[in-house]
Image (cartoon, coloured by chain):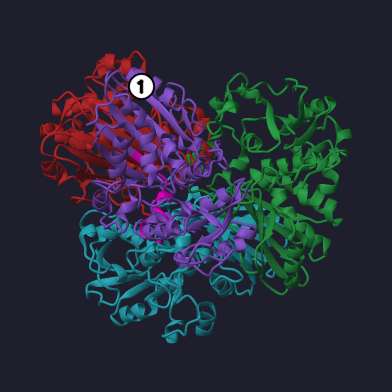
Chain colours: A purple, B red, C green, D cyan
Amino acid sequence: MEISVAVLGATGYAGSELIRLIEGHPYFTIGHLAAHSQAGKKVSEVLPGISGPTACMVLVTSDMPVPDDVQLVFTALPHGAAAQSVKMALDAGKKIVDLSADFRHRSATTYKTAYGLDHPYPELLEEAVFGLTEFSRADVVNTRLVANPGCYPTSTLLPLVPLLKADALNTDRIIVDSKSGVSGAGRSAKTDLLYCEMNEGVRAYGLPRHRHAWEMEGWARGFSGRAIRVQFVPHILPMTRGMLTTLHLAGQDPESWYAILDQAFRNEPFVRVLPEGALPSTKGVNGSNRCDIGLMVTGTDTAVVISCLDNLLKGAAGQAVQNANIMFGLDESSGLSTQAIWP
Amino acid sequence: MEISVAVLGATGYAGSELIRLIEGHPYFTIGHLAAHSQAGKKVSEVLPGISGPTACMVLVTSDMPVPDDVQLVFTALPHGAAAQSVKMALDAGKKIVDLSADFRHRSATTYKTAYGLDHPYPELLEEAVFGLTEFSRADVVNTRLVANPGCYPTSTLLPLVPLLKADALNTDRIIVDSKSGVSGAGRSAKTDLLYCEMNEGVRAYGLPRHRHAWEMEGWARGFSGRAIRVQFVPHILPMTRGMLTTLHLAGQDPESWYAILDQAFRNEPFVRVLPEGALPSTKGVNGSNRCDIGLMVTGTDTAVVISCLDNLLKGAAGQAVQNANIMFGLDESSGLSTQAIWP
Amino acid sequence: MEISVAVLGATGYAGSELIRLIEGHPYFTIGHLAAHSQAGKKVSEVLPGISGPTACMVLVTSDMPVPDDVQLVFTALPHGAAAQSVKMALDAGKKIVDLSADFRHRSATTYKTAYGLDHPYPELLEEAVFGLTEFSRADVVNTRLVANPGCYPTSTLLPLVPLLKADALNTDRIIVDSKSGVSGAGRSAKTDLLYCEMNEGVRAYGLPRHRHAWEMEGWARGFSGRAIRVQFVPHILPMTRGMLTTLHLAGQDPESWYAILDQAFRNEPFVRVLPEGALPSTKGVNGSNRCDIGLMVTGTDTAVVISCLDNLLKGAAGQAVQNANIMFGLDESSGLSTQAIWP
Amino acid sequence: MEISVAVLGATGYAGSELIRLIEGHPYFTIGHLAAHSQAGKKVSEVLPGISGPTACMVLVTSDMPVPDDVQLVFTALPHGAAAQSVKMALDAGKKIVDLSADFRHRSATTYKTAYGLDHPYPELLEEAVFGLTEFSRADVVNTRLVANPGCYPTSTLLPLVPLLKADALNTDRIIVDSKSGVSGAGRSAKTDLLYCEMNEGVRAYGLPRHRHAWEMEGWARGFSGRAIRVQFVPHILPMTRGMLTTLHLAGQDPESWYAILDQAFRNEPFVRVLPEGALPSTKGVNGSNRCDIGLMVTGTDTAVVISCLDNLLKGAAGQAVQNANIMFGLDESSGLSTQAIWP
């Protein structure tokens, strides 16, 4: 079996990882690559890491029709721009995993609050499945449109949802302090993302309320049924990849939380709960599709939960392939690694 | 006026910065350099950044008597080892700034709880002045022994104390999420501090309770009169220098906190409260003795306060020189820079 | 088909990559993991990037007999220590790829000159095949012992050998200026490999004559029949992976060299000669088993040739698997990626 | 004595260092700051490292007249743009240190060959002094216009000129392999200078002939009287600051070269020849105005000479201040540090 795949937005950092993952995938093959601002160039001129026949493909514009034989489309476009491409691909009968934010919210009102845009296709919001795979499998298998979660929500919700389901948490005191590598900010030529301005520097950004806060709160409720309020503070660090989220939590009987997390993820191929007392590092997950989680009880009613993932893999392209595998009835792990590139 | 100075523990990272600062100081000159494990070597063999006559000095052991003409001793030794050297120097009539933790606690019991050691000179604990300069000037000027604060407590207490004094905070819900460059872990040959294991990696450590938590709580009370409890989670990042502390705070009327901080530090040469809405970066302070502070209100009863400093300067050697300047009646800024080395 | 594999020296940086590659290999499976100083620990305690069943395996000492069902042994041990393990494995009927320097020299005299050691099994030197795969395939297929080349010789010889064979070069004026990531220095706890001492620093080392110079000269002659003399200056840079070698070459008609290189590597899966005028970067190869080569003519009788590879993959573990694939009659690319992890 | 100073091009990386150095200078004070693209903003909005009154100054456009009381102008503008500002400042009676390439060449023809521009004021080329301070002092003291050398030529010529003067070198076989931090590429928002594209990457650039090659050849002849030809290959490395130049040299009796270098620089405050056998690192000079030089004999007629400097200090702003000190009859070291910021 061979499934032809398109990537729209192929030359960004998530797009580039999608190409690499598809190249190593046992069933997916690349059938179409679009990148608006780079259209007309060969892949190798824009992506130095890609070699072989794919490197010789010519990039087309994002609004070019996707070939008929393509069955699966990954859209790695900016929010706002993705919706149109998704609609076109749906109308052409493709299955889609959208890595933008355009279909992550059930309500067009929330979308507008978070992104400041009127949604062009609100009727599709209900249909789209929010693909936090570990909690969405049953829906992903049947949908034609997956909204792939953001990296911050993925790293936050994976440990949070089981604790919420168990009613363990004080839902008013959830503090999410995240640390992200620079690739999360994308491949745009901005002065403050230059090597010299990021190296040896760490800073918070996106305050007082980053867009991903709505996504966290919305889907915490969506998966657990409980309303929460998060104080979310993202930071950008001098590293290319990796995301570490520190959850400062309050609630009842934190000594029991380890068992809750362990139970939730014991059989998951891409989530590892570390032994009690061990703390994860982004070094342990970079290059893999894995999320590592550690727990440390800090008081009679408080604990710290820390999760690590590769923001471009489990936080973007890796989870996208994980969802696509399910959509096509494949082994969920096809083409994905659980082992990190270390050191 | 020329004041001869000794540095004990001269070849660690704080020791090396002390040498550089003394070399550029208008009144201090280097009279004695000790470094136990490197004794017998020339400075230039161990510290590649030092040149000129000082580079040719021979390092002696830390237990060698300090020459008579030395008036000021900086001890940059491991906790436990520093106390003995401090005692010897005091007995020889020197003034001392101790960069270790040995004299930071008023109570030998707390010291033992935090460091697991019986204090050899508990009678000196009462005499030592905790040198968080902005809050300790009146005492520093008269003392012969300054206990220089830790880097984490400095970055935490500078913004916290004014808010506590103003009774603005819920003292049970103080969350301190700190991010430190690797130099804070010192110059010891440990596998987990190797370049390849730190680069592209971030991780928390020191949980469930890092030793600096006692120092924060003790001196929050010491300076403000209020008992607090902190949840302190330190992280180590892939950068050499710099510390960013994110304080997740709750309390009354956070809209009024900016004025409290601004009022507290308006005339301080080494603390800058950024304009409302601006967030600091470690890039803005590295190489300087400055601490930058930003505030962002996140709700009706919550706010985030972020402070940045160079862990080896305002967090160690810089503040030590700042204190020493006061002890000798000099301009507090002598030999210290308010401008960062940027980029 | 399933081939059980042992890794001796499993917890160094090359060893760790061998485990990852074997885990993703279609035919190899891990049957035995030894790491002398870490014996008794579980893999996950020492290698944070490895998860799943392999992470739970217990490391044994390097002198433990390799199980009977293991057919292939990778030895990633220090030079001097490897020879003994190789001999034991040969005597037990295994096939071996040795990543140390112990079997890279045909002559025990050269080995002693370069490494200062008497070779314990000189009779094996003649038998061992120097596995610079692109030039050694015919011999690798039939041998039971491959000496896997060093990273510097691999990056140097790949572009140099075709030019030597074509008699294009002035063999007295070959200057090799190499730049390596820190992982090439191994995982030992040395002060000068600490993050803080490598970050923002570049330096040459190993002068006046690094051990790999003998390997380059010996195999330049071995593969091309021409005696050369290299001036080799290695540098270590602040990055974990990657090696760039700049060859400053003199000779006749450098305008014709591009065709020589292109011809030599046109059909090679793991060597890419970039289009004329393009220069490679280590970013374009990291995470892959590929070597990228660029050429720039700089005068009527001079040119610069630049090669890039991942020192832990094409420079170590990747080429080792490439050789092992050939030894077992598999597709040479099995389990190896030509696509870089980028960015 | 107080000398008011202007910086044109104040918000680039060299400009920012000029501000810091002037702020710490005993006689210079900032009187005027221009930055074309940032005009109208406060310094602190563009340069996060600057604090105090200077941070509140408003940037003006580069073509604004410099105030009458300003005696000294530093022009840190792009080549081509600097010439006009230099002419205006000269006509207004100022002394100027120009950090651009516009006045580094004696001949307008060479300038056009290297930069592709017709020089607007060729009559000034003869008058300008090429300020490689250690070789130019006698001329710098009397001039009103110093052309500050490029970073690559500074790191190359410092060790090369004494060896050329001593007639030690084969002038046809001078190979210059340089490694530079990213700040040398300036502060422009280009994709290939983004953190994610530079981190973990090293690459050569500027081939076949970088503009600085003409500057090296021209001033090697200017200072030594000998014509040379260099093969110059610059590389960019993942670090913010620092430059290491590896000179692969051939000539007679290299064992005698150490004495030549030692003799040349023995009394220089900002050049250090390391002990025989020692090799410099950029870590040893970053943050200082020092150049460190090491020599290693590699054969009977070959040697490697390695020089290190901070590209923004001895390679730009530091040397500019060193020259300005001489122009105003001050101690050449005023406001400059010989000690590195380490680690």
Q: Please name whichever residue, D243 or B262, is drawn nearer the observer in this view of the structure.
A: B262
Question: In the shown orientation, is residue B68 left or right of residue C164?
Answer: left
Q: Please name whichever residue, A184 or D51, is drawn nearer the observer in this view of the structure.
A: A184
Q: Please name whichever residue, D256 or B238, is drawn nearer the observer in this view of the structure.
A: B238
Look at mark 1 in the image and give the residue it sits on: A257
For the point 46% across and 22% down, which residue is it?
A: A275
For the point 33% across and 14% down, which residue is it?
A: B120
Q: Is residue C292 magenta?
A: no
**Amino acid type, label 1:** Trp
Instruction: Please provide the residue range marked out in magenta.
Output: A178-192
Whether residue A265 appears in this view of the structure is: yes
Question: In the picture, which quadrant includes the C terminus of chain D?
Answer: top left
Question: In the shown orientation, is residue A217 left or right of residue D105?
Answer: left
Question: In the shown orientation, is residue D295 left or right of residue C117?
Answer: left
Question: In the picture, which quadrant includes the N terminus of chain D?
Answer: bottom left
Tell me: residue D166, above or below residue C211.
below
Tell me: residue D143, above or below residue D156.
below
Tell me: residue A134, above or below residue A53.
above
Q: Quadrant of residue B54?
A: top left
